[in-house]
Image: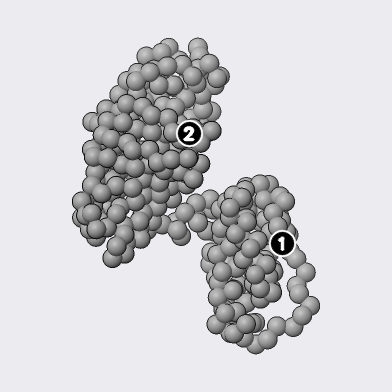
Amino acid sequence: MAEQDVTRADAEALEWLLALQEEPQGADVVARFEAWRADHPERAQAWDEIVGVYGAIGDVAPVHAERWAGLPGSVERVVAGRRRERRATPLGVGRRRLVATLAASAAALALAVLTPGALVRLQSDYVTGVGEVREVRLEDGSLVSLAPESALAVDYSAGRRDLRLVKGRAWFDVRHDPSRPFSVASRQVSARVLGTAFEVDADTPGVQVQRGLVGVSSSRASSMERVPAGRGVALDHDGRFRRAAVDPNAVAAWRDGQLLVENGAIGDVVQALGPWTRDLVLVRGRGLSERRVTGVYNLRDPDAVIRALAQAYDLEVTQVTPWVLVLSER
């Protein structure tokens, strides 16, 4: 393997360290890592060395280290935060220089590696934080609104417009261009359009169409769903699309800081507040979590939403710590 290939293997090993930290139980990520590592002895050597560099940073266990158990190769030793014995085989000058560079890079990236969401930021072109709604005008004139704690990657070429919703949810107002299909992929669904406005939710996962027509597909579904304005689809656990009518005026109401709920569950309302607050709100009791409510709530003031729920439905709010609230029956 040439020196430039060795350099590439070292860089890829560091990228895999980040990827496995972010998705320790992702079967696809682990499978691709195993294939990469087995493809050439230099890759396996690069991985072993970056593992050693990571371990040399210190004996601090990463976030969610317990979820790494059973992963291939030396991964388990890395995440346990234990030092490993250094390889007895001498390294060449070039390799030592590369390992030293990786050590510096690993030290600089240590906090990012140990923090959930690092890989999301590395994969994305646009990212939003807690309570942040961001509007982005793409190069073709299409408009994107990102909900709080969301991330989007953009890949435009001469003949295609491919976007990937890495996390969260986003609303798209697409500039019509038949010669350049516009597609948005999330973890489980993909939406393809020519000119329309619609919302994609990576977590549900699902799509709601405000205007136009969207073709929605998934690797888990047998066929593509054609979804017109005023309709939405969500992917069930069995891989089938579930259709529902939606109010076009209510699609992506979070853009205006509103949460519109009609006969929704209290637990779902509280979950929707998650990206808008740094506080943790817990609903005590399954019965309360599934109680149905209707209303229009201000997402920009999560505390007011909790108070409104408590007042309207005779509930009790207990502040356990400055950052933890418990909603319960009186």
Q: Which mark is residue 289?
A: none
Query: What residue is disc 2 on?
Result: 240
Name the kind of residue labelled 2 in the image: Arg
The answer to whether 244 is drawn above or below residue 84 in the figure is above
* Separation of residues labelled 2 and 1 (CA atoms): 38 Å
Q: Give whichever of 106, 246 is nearer the camera.
A: 246
Count of numbered marks: 2
User: Tell me, what colour scheme is on the image?
Assistant: one colour
Q: Residue at x 62, y 61 (%)?
A: 33
Residue 11 visible? The answer is yes
| Residue at the far bottom in the pictured view | 93
Q: Residue at x 68, y 86 (%)?
A: 92
Q: Give the side of residue 118 with respect to residue 196, left or right.
A: right
Q: Give whichever of 214, 1 is nearer the camera.
A: 214
Local secondary structure at mark 1 = loop
Local secondary structure at mark 2 = loop
Give the percent coordinates (x, y) of residue 23.
Answer: 57, 51
Give the percent coordinates (x, y) of residue 214.
Answer: 31, 41
Name the kind of residue labelled 1 in the image: Ser
Give the percent coordinates (x, y) of residue 6.
Answer: 60, 79
Give the percent coordinates (x, y) of residue 148.
Answer: 37, 43
Q: Give the side of residue 47 with respect to residue 259, left or right.
A: right
Name which quarter of the figure residue 5 lies in. Answer: bottom right
Give the number of the mark in front: 2 or 1: 2
* Image quadrant occupied by the N terminus: bottom right
Q: Residue at x 40, y 49 (%)?
A: 185
Q: Residue at x 23, y 31 (%)?
A: 249
Q: Give whichever of 101, 291 is nearer the camera.
A: 291
Q: Give the side of residue 292 with respect to residue 109, left or right.
A: left
Query: What residue is disc 1 on?
Result: 74
Residue 257 visible? The answer is no
Decide which of tag 2 and tag 1 comes sooner along the chain.
Answer: 1
